[in-house]
Image (cartoon, helix red, strand yellow):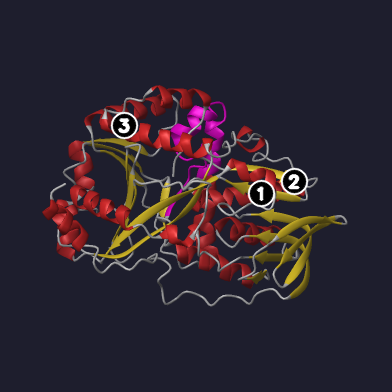
Amino acid sequence: MAPSAMTRWTTSLSEARPVPFWLDDPGKPHPEPALTGAETCDLLVVGGGYSGLWTALIAKERDPQRDVVLLEGREAGWAASGRNGGFCAASLTHGLANGVARWPDEIHKLQELGARNLDEIEKAVARHSLDCDFERTGEIDVATETYQAFELRDWYEETVRRGLAEDTEFLDAEAVREQVDSPTFVAGLYDRRGVALVHPAKLAWGLKRACLRLGVRIYEHTPALTLKPYGAGMAVRTPYGRVRARRVALGTNIFPNLVKRVRSYTVPVYDYALMTEPLSPDRLASIGWNERQGLGDSANQFHYFRLSADNRILWGGYDAIYSYGGRVRAEYDDRPETYAKLAGHFFGCFPQLEGVRFTHAWGGAIDTCSRFSAFFGTAYQERVAYAAGYTGLGVGATRFGAEVMLDLLAGERTERTELEMVRKKPLPFPPEPFAWTGIALTKWSLARADAHDGRRNLWLKTMDRLGLGFDS
């Protein structure tokens, strides 16, 4: 990398604040008071991200008389729910390809449930007046190498054969650049209906307000410390109090699960993003992007990018950082070496935007599991339910997970609980040092595949056969 190029790219970061753009908002709501003393309720929800907020909201919509309490260790939406790219996808399986590979016999049902789930999110945005910049834009997966273009076309033809290509279109180089003009784009696969874009923090804050309006009692700055049986229900201890509940739903994702045997199924992966200043009309015109679709490239080490409501570009992804021991620490949220790398990639994709500056640069942890998509279960004689492992596509799928948890706690057999995806779990990650070694080898192999026309080495082929992987 030429020093002059590095200077140019890093100069674009000179005024970037190391805080998430979405959370840096004057409309951020004040936190609810912490719990002090004792509480009782029908349903206790632990976690104030999307998973917990959707669970509490849907529980009250199903039964307005149900007494619901939600505990959040910090503030609603402060973790992954307020830091992500805001891609609200219909997919419940971390993309169609992953779903076909793992649940081929159920994929049509999973696609149907995912489409219905996204429609229900759109309805909830309207019903509860969630001011979250919801746009049903769709998404284009773009190829930036010739081999990726062939792979995209082959995959599109396979989805057509399987009857899974509704509202999807293959774009050649000319067609994709008519949508968004980057000299690096050589093909694209355009899903016109399966993705919406949102302001992720505003979605979380809107869900919080909706829960409060429906009577959910929310306590923030109240971490749940222990979970134990208590009579016919459960008891959760907090720093200044306790909650006794008939049923408990755990939506803590990257944070240590109160059901200890679940912890080995996920590892925290740190993902990073940049946000530009608002683009001028001339700069925006230089790249087109009139339909405002979400975009992601087709490499193993992929980027995701999108426009905000005020025409900034969010540019994230590529690095997926796992720290030895699976530690989650605040200092990992800031990684200048990744920001510099992302800035260089950004101007490689959009050279016509040279001179644009970044205003925010941030990171955060994602809970990933070995099958890349959420898993579910119960504990303590079905008095406790959990969902975790969304692997970066939880903006939409967490609502589905909330319904699964509520079904499980009710002891109901539904079309959701009958799914193999719900009934079976992924393989857990091994203990250290094996987890770190395996993840490091996988990351090296994925980078090598990207540099060698997508050719997967023996390690990746073995992981594929075992149904294992590492992703963000």
**Residue 384 located left or right of residue 207:** right
Pinpoint residue 181: horizontal percent, then vertical percent.
18, 48
Q: What residue is disc 1 on? A: 386
The answer to whether mark 1 and mark 2 are in CB contact below 8 A is yes
- Label located before the other in sequence (1 or 3): 1
Pinpoint residue 101: horizontal percent, then vertical percent.
49, 28
Q: What residue is disc 3 on? A: 448
User: Does the magenta run of residues contain 304?
Assistant: no
Given the image, on which type of amino acid does mark 1 rest? Tyr
Alpha-carbon span between mark 3 and mark 2: 41 Å
Q: Residue 123, relative to residue 472: is it above or below?
A: below
Classify mark 2: residues with Cα within 10 Å, few (<14), some (14-19) or many (20+): some
Q: Quadrant of the C terminus?
A: top left
Classify mark 1: residues with Cα within 10 Å, few (<14), some (14-19) or many (20+): many
Q: Nearer the viewer, residue 220 or 125?
A: 220
The answer to whether mark 3 and mark 2 are in CB contact below 8 A is no
Alpha-carbon span between mark 1 and mark 3: 36 Å
Given the image, on which type of amino acid does mark 2 rest? Ala
Q: What residue is disc 2 on? A: 379
**Residue 39 shows in the view:** yes
Q: Residue 158, relative to residue 384: is it above or below?
A: above
Q: Which residues are magenta?
A: 87-115
Residue 8 in which image quadrant = bottom left
- Label located before the other in sequence (1 or 2): 2
